[in-house]
């Protein structure tokens, strides 16, 4: 694993694939904290647990199922459409527009995609707020996964097939280490953004970078002149 990369490493990449939350913007901007609080409130209402126990159940579902919604659907009668709207309907005041990232994305040679366990409604709001929505060729949200989230291997295969992506010429950026493992198994290059939230960073991670923009900048044609 490396903290950076040379042009030679990714010179053949034709598809740049990005997780969204805590990857395309810094975790410190707090959006996922707001979403997690909404999820906790939803579980309290749906299951009838105190907030502390609901938080434990939320973490259990994330570990076992990949998302809280998947765990709720497997164990309780919930309306997934209501869940997705309620938990993602958070203020985005703390999310900062990033014109520099927009410029770098525009200069990447090849197609760009978002692969997120979040709702399409949430992805549209977040990408628009950052100012990068127009720089992606597609957004593959939880609805496009039939609500089967990363890291389910079938979700990655479906994404690659739907967008006609050769995994051997693709690179995937994520802040959650385990979500990179299926991508690597399919032949994609993998880049972990951030510290991995304390989780294992295994051999399926090719590169680690504290900041997405720092990693991407050398590959942008806008910076090649």
Image (cartoon, grey):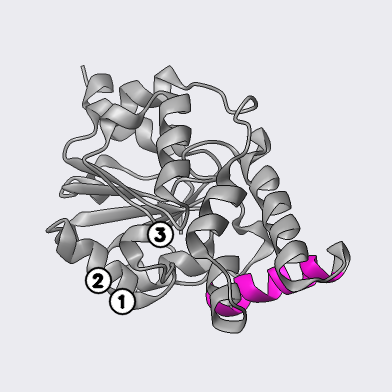
Of mark 3 and mark 2, the one earlier in the sequence is: 3
**Mark carried by residue 154:** 1
Eye-nearest disc, 1 or 3: 3
Which residue carries the number 2 mark?
A: 157
Q: Is residue 88 magenta?
A: no
> Distance from label 3 to label 2 (Cα)?
14 Å
Q: Quadrant of residue 48?
A: bottom right
Q: Is residue 56 magenta?
A: yes
- Residue closer to the observer: 75 or 208: 75
> As drawn, is 139 to the left or to the right of 55?
left
Q: Residues within 10 Å of mark 3 (few under 14, many from 20)?
A: many
User: Where is residue 112 shown, x and y percent of the image?
Assistant: 25, 42
Which residue carries the number 3 mark?
A: 142
Which residue shows up at 24% across the image and 68% down it? Answer: 158
Question: Over which residues does the magenta segment extend?
Answer: 53-66
> Distance from label 1 to label 3 (Cα)?
13 Å
Q: Residues within 10 Å of mark 2 (few under 14, many from 20)?
A: some
């Amino acid at each position: 694993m490396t903290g950076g990369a040379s042009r030679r490493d990714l010179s053949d990449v034709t598809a740049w694939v990005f997780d969204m939350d805590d990857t395309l913007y810094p975790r410190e901007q707090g959006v996922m904290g707001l979403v997690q609080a909404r999820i906790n409130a939803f579980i309290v209402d749906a299951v009838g647990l105190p907030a502390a126990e609901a938080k434990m159940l939320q973490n259990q579902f994330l570990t076992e199922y990949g998302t809280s919604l998947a765990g709720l659907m497997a164990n309780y009668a919930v309306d997934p459409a209501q869940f997705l709207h309620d938990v993602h309907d958070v203020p985005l005041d703390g999310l900062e527009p990033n014109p520099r990232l927009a410029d770098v994305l525009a200069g990447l040679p090849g197609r760009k995609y978002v692969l997120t366990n979040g709702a399409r409604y949430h992805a549209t709001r977040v990408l628009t707020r950052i100012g990068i929505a127009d720089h992606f060729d597609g957004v593959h949200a939880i609805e496009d996964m039939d609500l089967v989230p990363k890291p389910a291997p079938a979700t990655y295969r479906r994404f690659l097939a739907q967008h006609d992506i050769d995994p051997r010429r693709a690179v995937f950026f994520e802040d959650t280490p385990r979500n990179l493992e299926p991508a690597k198994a399919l032949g994609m290059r993998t880049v972990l953004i951030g510290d991995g939230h304390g989780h294992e960073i295994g051999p399926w991670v090719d590169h680690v970078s504290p900041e997405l923009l720092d990693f991407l900048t050398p590959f942008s044609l806008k910076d090649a002149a």
